[in-house]
Image: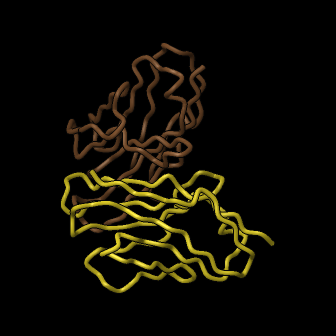
Chain colours: A brown, B yellow
Amino acid sequence: DAGITQSPRHKVTETGTPVTLRCHQTENHRYMYWYRQDPGHGLRLIHYSYGVKDTDKGEVSDGYSVSRSKTEDFLLTLESATSSQTSVYFCAISWARNSGNTIYFGEGSWLTVV
Amino acid sequence: AQTVTQSQPEMSVQEAETVTLSCTYDTSESDYYLFWYKQPPSRQMILVIRQEAYKQQNATENRFSVNFQKAAKSFSLKISDSQLGDAAMYFCAYRSAVEYGNKLVFGAGTILRVKS
């Protein structure tokens, strides 16, 4: 158990509404990530954070924003949800920069945009 | 940018038999890490095995072993004595040892079915 909690675990929302997913960790890991999983694509990186208030874009960042005001929380926001953002979202954490350390994943958040 | 390719969308294996899942990757870097993750129906991501590129010896974890061919940029996973609990989606992943951020790049995944 890597001490990662994602909330909500399941959400159905309407097109055009804002949605925020929360990732909370208890391990004091510096690096946090948001991935989305879609059939045929594996997991793709949306945004990541390397410290409080330090974030950067990943491969599929359009339509998403993130914030990290505390070490333990990393928020992913869909400002205006679209059907193409229906997906399973995974948060992940990592211990240290460019170490051999493993990246640990949360249990996923299922988001359906109707 | 690095890419990871898993060319087998689905594989089947008989219980107690051996199966090999394929993975190739593209990178210009010489220092990196490679991983296999298992994702059962619960969707939990479970690390199966890890290989450091600077190590020539292939990694092994109980019934799981890899065939790491650095020059060919190939990283296959062999599962011996397959069990029903091995049925899952398997992802191959790459991580740079020099690029900032510890970011993982995933392949599209291979669904493994185990027949009893």
Residue B17 screen position, x and y as percent: 69, 81
Q: Quadrant of the C terminus of chain B?
A: bottom right
Residue B35 occupies which quadrant of the picture? bottom left
Q: Nearer the viewer, residue A4 or A90?
A: A90
Tally the marks.
Answer: 0
Q: Is residue B85 above or below residue B62?
A: above
Say left or right for A76 vs A58.
Answer: right
Q: Nearer the viewer, residue A92 or B108?
A: B108
Say left or right for B41 vs A88.
Answer: right
Residue B99 occupies which quadrant of the picture? bottom left
Residue B3 screen position, x and y as percent: 35, 54
Q: Is residue A79 above or below residue A46?
A: above
Residue at 54% x, 23% y is: A83
Single out the residue that lies furthest toward the top. Answer: A16
Residue at 56% x, 23% y is: A113
Residue A20 screen position, x and y as percent: 44, 27
Residue at 50% x, 52% y is: B108
Q: Is residue B81 above or below residue B89?
A: below
Single out the residue that lies furthest toward the bottom. Answer: B57
Q: Is residue A52 above or below residue B25?
A: above
Q: Nearer the viewer, residue B74 or A111?
A: B74
Residue B93 occupies which quadrant of the picture? bottom left
Residue A5 screen position, x and y as percent: 48, 45
